[in-house]
């Protein structure tokens, strides 16, 4: 077991989902960005899925939903909640993974924890392998003005320009939203949420 997997398994072991710092009871920013794509019944992969409640909304829309997480604890909790309504993948985006291809890649939980350039290169390589031309990526991170640590880990923060630079010329920035996440303890956490299209 890697140190990263052990860290996240510990974070999700016997935790109260609603008291995790990144917990959201509603997901309007993400869902509005998905609506901008203008298509229905999409094949979506959520990376760093954790135990998010976003999937309540995605499944209602008759989308084909897959989730990826480094934490087996998180995946087990999702399986107990959603059963066969979703597909589950256990893996680390810092290495090469094979998960198939999708219409949308959604990430609100992984990229800002990747501090090393090599980790970020692996992330983009996995993204490019999973999303063909015409597909989309919704990437949400702590913003430049946001927190520098989360879950006792350092963060690498972004704005929309830095994200566009990271993804490269194969990706076009369609929209971005700067917003504030209020965590379960009432603290403000600035985020940037972006929608990209693969050229």
Image: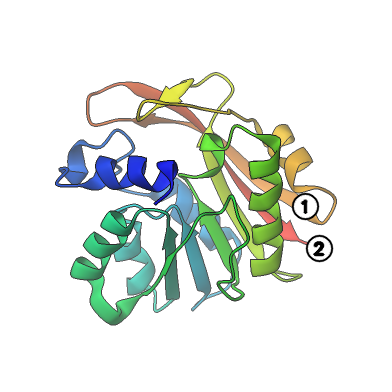
User: Where residue 75 is drawn, which disc sits there?
Assistant: none
Residue 192 visible in the current orientation: no
Q: Position of residue 72 (x, y in %)?
A: 32, 59
Residue 99 position (above or below residue 50):
below
Q: Nearer the viewer, residue 6 or 146?
A: 6
Q: Are marks 2 and 1 in contact (CB under 8 Å)?
A: yes
In the picture, measured across the screen, residue 67 lies left or right of residue 137, that is: left
Q: Nearer the viewer, residue 32 or 53?
A: 53
Give the quarter of the image for residue 194.
Answer: top right
Q: Position of residue 37 (x, y in %)?
A: 61, 64
Query: Mark 2 falls on what kind of element?
Result: loop
Q: What colour scheme has been applied to the protein in the rendered image?
A: rainbow
Q: Nearer the viewer, residue 8 or 65?
A: 8
Question: Looking at the image, is mark 2 or mark 1 earlier in the sequence?
Answer: 1
Residue ID for mark 1:
172
**Alpha-carbon distance for marks 2 and 1?**
7 Å
Dot 1 crowding, Cα within 10 Å, few <14, some 14–19, many 20+: some
Query: Mark 1 falls on what kind of element?
Result: strand
For the C terminus, the image quarter is bottom right
Dot 2 crowding, Cα within 10 Å, few <14, some 14–19, many 20+: few
In the picture, measured across the screen, residue 96 lies left or right of residue 190, that is: right
Residue 191 position (above or below residue 133):
above
Residue 171 position (above or below residue 22):
below
Q: How many marks?
A: 2
In the picture, measured across the screen, residue 67 lies left or right of residue 159, that is: left
Q: Nearer the viewer, residue 43 or 96?
A: 96
Residue ID for mark 2:
199
Residue at point 70%, 36% (across, down): 117
Q: Position of residue 39 (x, y in %)?
A: 57, 73
Residue 158 visible in the current orientation: yes
């Amino acid at each position: 077991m890697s140190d990263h997997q052990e860290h996240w398994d510990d974070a999700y072991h016997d935790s109260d989902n609603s008291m995790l710092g990144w917990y959201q009871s509603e997901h309007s920013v993400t869902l509005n960005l998905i609506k901008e794509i203008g298509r229905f019944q999409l094949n979506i992969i959520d990376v760093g899925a954790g135990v998010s409640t976003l999937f309540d909304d995605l499944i209602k829309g008759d989308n084909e939903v897959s989730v990826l997480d480094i934490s087996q604890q998180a995946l087990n909790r999702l399986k107990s909640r959603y059963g066969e309504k979703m597909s589950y993948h256990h893996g680390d985006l810092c290495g090469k993974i094979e998960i198939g291809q999708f219409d949308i890649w959604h990430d609100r939980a992984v990229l800002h924890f990747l501090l090393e350039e090599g980790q970020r290169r692996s992330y983009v390589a996995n993204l490019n392998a999973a999303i063909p031309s015409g597909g989309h990526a919704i990437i949400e991170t702590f913003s430049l003005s946001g927190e520098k640590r989360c879950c006792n880990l350092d963060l690498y923060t972004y704005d929309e320009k830095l994200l566009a630079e990271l993804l490269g010329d194969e990706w076009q920035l369609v929209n971005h939203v700067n917003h504030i996440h209020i965590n379960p303890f009432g603290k403000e956490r600035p985020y940037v949420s972006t929608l990209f299209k693969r050229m």
